[in-house]
Image (cartoon, helix red, strand yellow):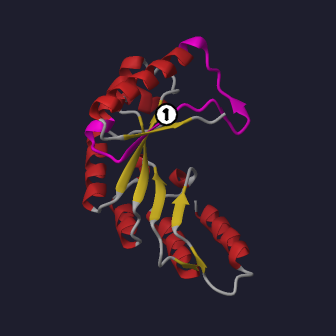
Amino acid sequence: MIFIIDYLIKNIDFVIWNSNSKIKLNSIYIWWWTPNIVWAKNLNKLFKYIFSVFDLSCIKQFNIDINPYLLDNEIFTVLKEYNVTRVTYAIQSFNKSVLDLNSRYNTEIDHYYNINLFHKLWIKVNIDLMIWIKWQTLEICKSDILKSIDLNVDNISLNYFIQSDNVVYQIDDEKKYLISQVKKYFNKVINYRYNKSYNEQEET
């Protein structure tokens, strides 16, 4: 949504208006709301503005959240043009039933294709997996973990949101047990393969 980009630019203007010189940044992280505005023309407008008003000569990391459903060749072109170094790729799950319930319509083949392109562009990849979505089972979660590891990404995040925007999700004992078992399994697999980092995210 273009109005979000305009809002962000106005907020950046507010931050920098009193500065006599360009503010030097060493890291940029565009997070969370990105899936709603990740069309190429919007990203290009935002990135072009950021590069014009900040000193990025010492930039070490340029990270952006990506919704696989909106990813296309134009987005890849923008990411390459502005030297994005890392993406958080919100797979959520590889299971079709789980994805349908979460309004995600990508296929496994899409994910393999996209992540292969990220690798070719030397862009590091963090995969986001969800373990609170309705109808998930332990076996589905285990399968998601193994498939994520096999994609040879740089980081895997397990997300189990309990509260967001003052809305409390009902986490019953069965779901708590699922979360604990998934975490246990994940640690076991990671310790065995030891070549993937683990990032556990919980919002409370």
Viewer-proximal residue among 86 and 105? 86
On the image, the x and y values in percent for residue 188 come to: 36, 25
Where is 31 relative to 28, above or below? above
Q: Of residues 177 and 116, which is closer to you in this image? A: 177
The answer to whether 128 appears left or right of 12 in the picture is left
* Residue located 36% across and 64% down the image: 74
Indicate left or right for 183 with 111 as reference: right
Give the quadrant of the C terminus.
top right
Q: Which residue is mark 1?
A: 102
Q: On screen, 165 above or below 72?
A: above
Pick whichever, 6 or 130, lies toward us.
130
Check disc 1 and report its element: helix, strand or loop. loop
> Looking at this rendering, what residue extends furthest in the top direction?
173
Looking at the image, which residue is at 35% across and 62% down? 76
Please state if 53 lies on the left or on the right of 83 as rendered: right
Amino acid type, residue under disc 1 in the picture: Asn
The quarter in which the N terminus is drawn is bottom right
Q: Residues within 10 Å of mark 1 (few under 14, many from 20)?
A: few
Which one is in front, 135 or 139? 139
Spot occupied by residue 166 in the image (x, y as percentages of width and height): 74, 35
- As for residue 6 lying within the magenta part, the answer is no
* Span of residues in magenta: 148-174
Q: Position of residue 69 (x, y in %)?
A: 41, 47
The residue sitting at 74% across, 81% down in the picture is: 18
User: Relative to 14, is 88 above or below?
Assistant: above
Magenta highlight on residue 166: yes
In the rendering, at what x and y percent does residue 4 appear? 63, 61
